Image: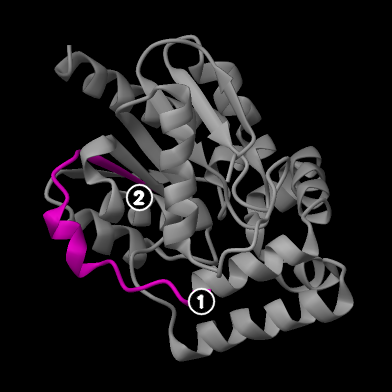
Amino acid sequence: MQLYSRDVGDGTPLVLLHAFPLSSAMWLAQREALSARFRVVTPDLRGFGGSPLGTAEPSVDVMADDVAALLDAKGIDRAVVGGLSMGGYITLAFCRRHADRVLGLVLADTKATADTETARAGRLRMAERLEEDKTVDVLLEDLLPRLVGPTTMRQRALIYGRVRGLVQSAPPAAAAWAQRAMAARPDALESLAELRSPALVIHGAEDEITTEEDARAMAGALPNAELTLVPGSGHLTAVEQPQLFNDAVAEFAAALGRTTR
């Protein structure tokens, strides 16, 4: 699997994994701001954007291995690896399978616990509808209203419109595959204690999909983690409050770069 990716800048590699059901286009503000200090690599995950879906069974482990293969192709041995929402699940899988390649990890608006039975069943129902309808209407109806916070809805119409456009661009087959992969992911909370890489946990104060409790549980379970709460943001902190998100990531990654010299 050869993932399409955008790769800009020089310095410490910073790999950012996008949310469901978006693409690496969501990281525009991060590429523009952070590439002055870091090498920013933003892949389209399997089936999204410019990357093919392939024939593998749905799995976050498969998606994590795709990222490892991308780093191999780019000659990147170790990197700061981060993800938002689904990207966070893949970051955790990457740490599980390729821990020696992680300089540090960024976990934004995500959680380490597995889905509840109710949540898992909801994902599978959504996957079935995506496959049956062959449109992303269900995502626009059920998911889009929860992706951004009320402050963005009231004050940032352009950002909401951009997120809607990204959702509309998602291929239904890829969205269904990813839902099945997320539904099958294991609980990773207890394994966080084994991760020695420094971590940054970011959470939008208005996030309705993951909770502050989820964020604090991850930060508490990780041996070396800091938590940043982002005001005025829902689930998509990197898109809704890019300046605050970028400042937190830049400070974190710059400190890692200094320690590895």
Is-magenta flag for residue 44?
Answer: no
Return the residue at label 2.
94
Q: Does residue 152 appear left or right of residue 211 in this picture?
A: right
On the question of residue 245 being in view, the answer is yes
Looking at the image, tell me whether mark 1 or mark 2 is earlier in sequence order: 2
From this view, report whether residue 26 is shown above or below residue 221.
above
* Location of residue 112 in the rendering, given as x and y in whole percent from the top left corner: 33, 65
Q: Is residue 41 left or right of residue 224?
A: right
Q: Quadrant of the C terminus?
A: top left
Q: CA distance from mark 1 to mark 2?
A: 17 Å
- The amino acid at mark 1 is Ala
- Per the image, label 1 sits on a secondary structure element best described as helix
Q: Residue 116 at what x, y percent from top left?
A: 43, 85
Looking at the picture, the colour scheme in use is one colour
Residue range highlighted in magenta: 183-202
Q: Which labelled disc corresponds to residue 183? A: 1
Q: Is residue 13 above or below residue 63?
A: above
Q: Secondary structure at mark 2?
A: helix
Three-letter amino acid code at the position of disc 2: Phe
Q: Residue at x 52, y 57 (%)?
A: 86
Q: Residues within 10 Å of mark 1 (few under 14, many from 20)?
A: many
Let me know if residue 188 is in the magenta part.
Answer: yes
Q: Is residue 237 left or right of residue 168?
A: left
